Amino acid sequence: MGLFRRREPLHERLAREGGLTEPVSPPDPRPQTQETGIHGLQRPREWDATVTVDAPDVGGDTARFVTLPDRTLLVEEGPDGSLDALASAVEQAVQPPYRARAARQSETRWAVQAKRIEVVRIPDGPEGDSIELTHTEDGTTLAVDDARTFGSIPVLEQLGERRGRDYVVRAERLDGDLWEVRAETL
């Protein structure tokens, strides 16, 4: 054995000889984070549909609205007049319920983007405007308007259970007992 030769430590040799070590795989040459546009990955789609529509009777320059399953429009921002022309154009591509935003492109032309949403009815729901229900192996927590509270909301728990064992369900009040919900796996 050479004078400057490095010996394998005893614990590593015994583990190797005993079959307790896994073969070392070569490292992945790809970068750990792949930014959009740099590595050929496209951006995640934010909107389900983008349409243009000729709507000379719609006032203002921008609008945000939600269309409920029964086709009722809830205007969140924009003109007090009817947005039916914008909603009709969107519904050629996306069926209610959906959230939409619109911007005037010219004197009469509007661009409208829409994204499908899930709407649930929570009868006798909490008084607040936002709910977050989180379920993990440690238990379930319920927060209304960012304040923890006791109780449960079975409708939201059922939505979360469809996602898996650990989940979070967020709900935003739309109108009365109608809520827009998003359920995610943790």
Image (cartoon, helix red, strand yellow):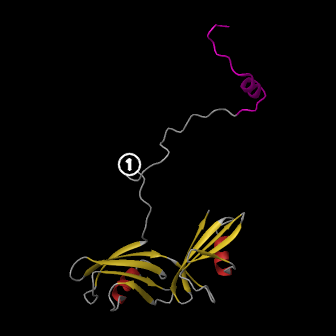
Q: Secondary structure at mark 1?
A: loop
User: Image point 57% across, 34% down: which residue?
Assistant: 26
Question: Magenta-highlighted stretch: main secondary structure?
Answer: loop
Q: Is residue 68 above or below residue 30?
A: below
Q: Is residue 146 above or below residue 81?
A: above
User: Image point 46% across, 79% down: which residue?
Assistant: 98
Please check the rendered image and state whether residue 20 is part of the magenta-colored stretch, yes or no. yes
Q: Is residue 146 left or right of residue 165?
A: left
* Front residue (pair 127, 182): 127
**Label 1 neighbourhood size at 10 Å, few (<14), some (14-19), many (20+)?**
few
Please report the bounds of the magenta region as a residue range.
Answer: 1-21
Q: Is residue 161 above or below residue 177?
A: above
Give coordinates of residue 13: x percent, y percent.
Answer: 73, 23
Give coordinates of residue 27: x percent, y percent.
Answer: 55, 36
Give coordinates of residue 1: x percent, y percent.
Answer: 68, 7
Tell me the amino acid under the disc marked 1: Ile
Please state, as top left, top right, bottom left or bottom right, where the C terminus lies in the image: bottom right
**How many marks do you count on the picture?**
1
User: Image point 37% across, 77% down: which residue?
Assistant: 101
Please check the rendered image and state whether residue 172 is part of the magenta-colored stretch, yes or no. no
Tag 1 residue: 38
User: Image point 41% across, 53% down: which residue?
Assistant: 36
* Residue sitting at the far front: 147
